[in-house]
Amino acid sequence: MHGVYQTNIVAWAFGNGVMSQSLVNPKQRSILFLVLPYMLQKAAANRVKSRSYLAFPYGVLSIATYLERQAKVNVNVEILDLNLYDLDDVSIVLEKTLEACKPEFVGISMMFDQSYRYVGAIASQIKSWNHKAIILLGGASATTAWDEILSEQSDVDALCYSEGEAAVSELLASSDPFMALQKDPWVTRESLKMMRRPRTTYVDHLNDVVDIDYDLVDTSVYSMKEAFSPFASYRKENDVRQFFMVTSRGCPFKCVFCAEPSLHGASMRYADIDAIIGHVERMVDNYGMNVLTFYDDQLLLDTKRAKELFRRLTPFKLRLEAPNGVTLVYIDDEMAFLMKQAGFDTIPLAIESGSDHVLNKVIRKPLKVNKIKPVVRALQRNGIFVQAFFVIGLPGEMDEHREETRQLIKDADLDWSGFSLATPVRGSALYKICKEKGYIKEDLGIGEIESNKYIIHAPDLGLEAEKITQQAYQMNLDVNFVNNRHMRLGDYETAIRCFEEVIDRYDNHAFAHYYLAEAYAALSLRPDAVIKNRRRFTELIDQDNDWRDYAASFGLLAEPASEPSPPKHAIS
Ligand code: SF4
């Protein structure tokens, strides 16, 4: 069946000297992993023009790979990614898969809050098919809402708190799974009654999970998406073969808005460089990988290891990405040089704020503003496009702090800046603060937070949705468009690539069309593109009062730009 792949690992298990089935367990285990839908609904997708994007189910692949190599019992593993199907067909696909696979265990992966709406119906369908099937729920979003979910979902038998590899492996090896579920990292209704707080069980050494077995899925049905960059390969119409990699887990920091510390712990765990390079070699040989996306939270923290990794990656001539952002204090000249050599053309820095007060007292991030500029320079000297991420609207951040952020972006001469509205995600300290102080509604359900919607309401602190949203967007337009670094430097080619990248994602972005026309006009290139983009800008500001207001506030309406003469070939 499309999207369902069976892995019979009996031969592998015996071949590696694992005890025979009869000694461990008379029964062969079978588990079906379900990846819950998380894609935009069709209606919403039609409103925003964006490249379709379906990521590999990395978490499930990691557990399946671990079972393949480490399980002490023979296991049939199947993966059904429900994102590969129309939502209307999910129930039928699930029914057929259950009948075909007859799993004893069903592991449901919930990585995003918006998937929560599907849990009840899917779990109910599984229990209707076979009430003895053991339903497990895991993933980042399940972990951060463990108590609420188990109280609400009576068909879910247990929830895995954070990392699932070792937990699922031990569960399947157990002769009494229900007994095994009474221990960490599992959460059950019984453990909730006993008020036992769950603790995770970590995979100590990531060599066991770094070499993901992509044969477990049909790689051709996944379409990855490179992060924002003027140099993204797809723009050059390359054949992009992009894969994920997580080479470390953990983060010693405790940023107020982040749930990560509750997921993977404060201590760092790593895969060895040899294991990483071995995986890269296999991915290049077997799948022609040419873009590698790191999803580590702290890729650079062990600077010696990071430098060695980049040296060893250089010969592969891959394009590298780190869309989670990197911590800038670990970047010196040598690191910047090695990153560029290894294949990074763009680096996002997780700066978060241009105010020392906000960084240290609000976010609790050990970063000083005066450290930022030298690192940006080092990266730019090595030909790297430097982006930075900022969070706007945290309780404790005032108007003057947001102005410090705007000023920092200009002083540091960043190539591009991304702004997120502060979001109290479950599992973060910010969520607790907002709950306790009444900054968010009392009954905020799982999955109710819409992305890029500001839901904190604290007028006494100057935090109201309309104002914060407007300030963040105004800052974005100011630093990325009106005062775009590459436009100022006369590097119109890079500016064009930036604006085209924006339009590719948001065709209705009036400022991107306006400045794309300006960049082409400055180069005296493509008069057709100048006309087209100026017309599109005019259309958008005529249709949308918000765009008109923003354009007026930056003086873009004062002197209507005259259209250049059409190119000769367009007339003839
Ligand atoms: S935002 Fe990054 S640095 Fe901060 S706690 Fe989360 S993972 Fe760590």
Image: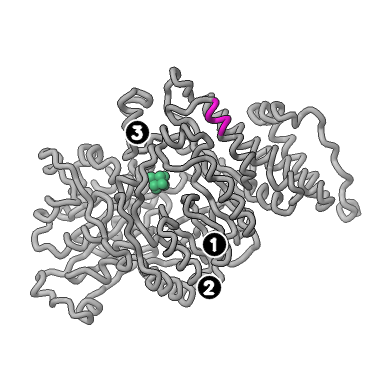
Location of residue 424 in the rendering, given as x and y in whole percent from the top left corner: 38, 34
Judge depth for marks 2 and 1 and give the one in front: 1
Residue range (magenta): 400-404
Q: Is residue 65 left or right of residue 243?
A: left
User: Image quarter for residue 65?
Assistant: bottom left
The residue that appears at 17% across and 51% down in the rendered structure is 184
Q: CA distance from mark 2 to mark 3?
A: 42 Å
Q: Amino acid at mark 3?
A: Tyr
The residue that appears at 22% across and 76% down in the rendered structure is 13
Q: Which residue is mark 3?
A: 431
Location of residue 514 in the rendering, given as x and y in whole percent from the top left corner: 73, 40
**Badge number at residue 316:** 2
Nearest the eye: 531 or 203: 203
Q: Is residue 327 left or right of residue 556?
A: left
Q: Amino acid at mark 2?
A: Phe
Dot placed on the residue nearer the N-terminal end, 1 or 3: 1
Dot placed on the residue nearer the N-terminal end, 2 or 1: 2
Q: Quadrant of the N terminus?
A: bottom left
| Tally of marks | 3
Q: Is residue 210 left or right of residue 120?
A: right
Q: Which residue is mark 1?
A: 334
Location of residue 411 in the rendering, given as x and y in whole percent from the top left corner: 63, 40
Element type at marker 1? helix
Colour approach in the figure: one colour
403 in the magenta segment: yes
Check mark 2 vs ligand 1: CB closer than 8 Å? yes or no: no
Element type at marker 2? helix
The residue that appears at 81% across and 51% down in the rendered structure is 523
